[in-house]
Image: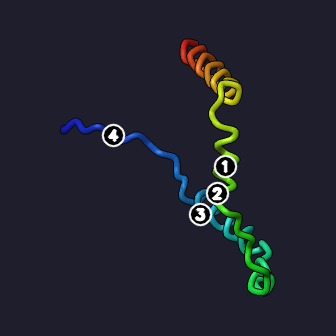
Amino acid sequence: MDCQMMPFARPRRRPLLALLTLLCLGVAACAPLPDIAQTVDAPPPVLVPLAGILAQADAVGTSAAAVAPVTARADRLRARADQLRSQ
């Protein structure tokens, strides 16, 4: 008698997947469509010059006061992740 490995039995998920797919399609089919006429007749968006945005970003800069809270939070999150890994 040949000794073969039996594959693990997997639960049948196809009916559940099909039901979930049909449910999602049904919900999507009931969603209201956007009014295309409003977007065609809408005024074009206002374009802002890029120079003003860049000047504002340079004014904020990367000062220590702006970066310190983000760095502190990143350090706290890293410490928490290390603590969770060690548990």
Q: Which residue is at a point 70% across and 47% down the rendered structure image?
A: 56
Pointer 4: what residue?
A: 6
Picture quarter containing residue 5? top left
Sort mark 1 into few (<14), some (14-19) or many (20+) by Cα contacts within 10 Å. Answer: few
42 above or below 19?
Answer: below
57 above or below 41?
Answer: above
Q: CA distance from mark 2 to mark 1?
A: 6 Å
- As drawn, the label of residue 18 is 3
Q: Quadrant of the N terminus?
A: top left
Given contact means CB atoms under 8 Å apart, are the residues at marks 2 and 1 in contact?
yes
Given contact means CB atoms under 8 Å apart, are the residues at marks 3 and 1 in contact?
no
Q: Which residue is at a point 55% across and 12% down the rendered structure image?
A: 86
Kindly state the secondary structure of the residue where label 2 is placed: helix
13 above or below 80?
Answer: below
Q: Nearer the viewer, residue 25 or 75?
A: 75
- As drawn, the label of residue 87 is none
User: Closer to the N terminus: mark 2 or mark 4?
Assistant: 4
- As drawn, the label of residue 55 is 1
Residue 85: horizontal and vertical position, in percent? 55, 17
Q: CA distance from mark 4 to mark 1?
A: 67 Å
Pointer 2: what residue?
A: 51
Kindly state the secondary structure of the residue where label 3 is placed: helix
Q: Which residue is at a point 60% across and 14% down the rendered structure image?
A: 83
Residue 29: horizontal and vertical position, in percent? 72, 74
Kindly state the secondary structure of the residue where label 1 is placed: helix
Kindly state the secondary structure of the residue where label 4 is placed: loop
| Count of numbered circles on the image | 4
User: Closer to the N terminus: mark 3 or mark 1?
Assistant: 3
